[in-house]
Amino acid sequence: MNNFLKRFIVLALSIVLASCISNFFGDGPPRIIKKAPTKDAIPRSEPPSQYGNGDKNGYYEVRGKRYKVMPSAGNYSATGIASWYGTKFHGRYTSNREIYNIYAMTAAHKSLPLPTYLEVTNLENNKKVIVRVNDRGPFVDDRLIDLSYAAALKLDVVKNGTAKVKVKTVTEKNYNQNEVINSISFIQIGVFEERKNAYDYLKLLKNNQFNTAQVRREFHWLKPLSPTYKVQIGPVQNKKHHNELLSKLRKIGVYQTKVVTN
């Protein structure tokens, strides 16, 4: 057997083994769990997502079954079973073409418009979180909502896998804007691998009077020579201040942000 054939067989076996391992382990929590779950999503006014809201009549199909997206989240309220999804989907596209992040406070729902903000209450322990719905699912008849890993962790749903919850819509108007977020919280605009891209974005923000904008360089132990560059604004004083900044960001076309604690 020549060396080329040997290498080919080893490579093929490796691919098959990796596939078997992936199927065996399936979905689940991350190997390395963060010390503290992410903060709640903060409701804000956003335009409907270009993707994930069905056809012109609001219909879409999954596994041969047809679903209809509600024309408005309105004063939506419902009680049902919550489940969660984890590492199997981490880094993949959500229904509205964002990237699923198990540490973000997000969720999937079959019929609410994307995006929608929901307050989710675990009726078994009365714990609450606010999530941003940016995905479709769960496509299991008896389940109401699929939570991100971070949201499920805060609600204490991870261990059992499911829990009975109550969900209701939350808007920017009915959210308590004066509550203090954290004196060391920042609005993160983006994360860049190229230094120039980050500083170009910083220049754009400075030119639009975001005087507290900054670039934070962060190193990772797996790539000690390749830092990432995080563009942030802050610190943020409270939720009112946060929403004022978001309103200004929307005027220059920036919608996808999150609150982080450095």
Image: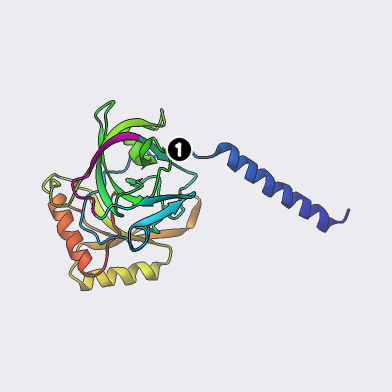
Magenta extent: 72-81
Residue 254, position as x, y percentages in the image: 27, 65
- Residue positioned 28% across, 60% down in the render: 48
Q: Residue furthest top?
A: 124
- SS of the residue at dot 1? loop
Q: Residue furthest right?
A: 1
Q: Residue furthest left?
A: 178
Look at the image and tell me whether residue 220 can be seen. Answer: no
Query: Position of 209 compared to 122: left or right?
Result: left
Q: Is residue 130 magenta?
A: no
| Image quadrant in which you'd find residue 71 | bottom left
Is 219 located above or below residue 26 in the figure? Answer: below
Look at the image and tell me whether residue 172 can be seen. Answer: yes
Q: Is residue 77 magenta?
A: yes
Q: Which residue is mark 1?
A: 29
**Relative to the observer, which residue lies in front, 143 or 225?**
143
Q: What crowding class fits label 1: few (fewer than 14 Cα within 10 Å), some (14-19), or many (20 or more)? A: some
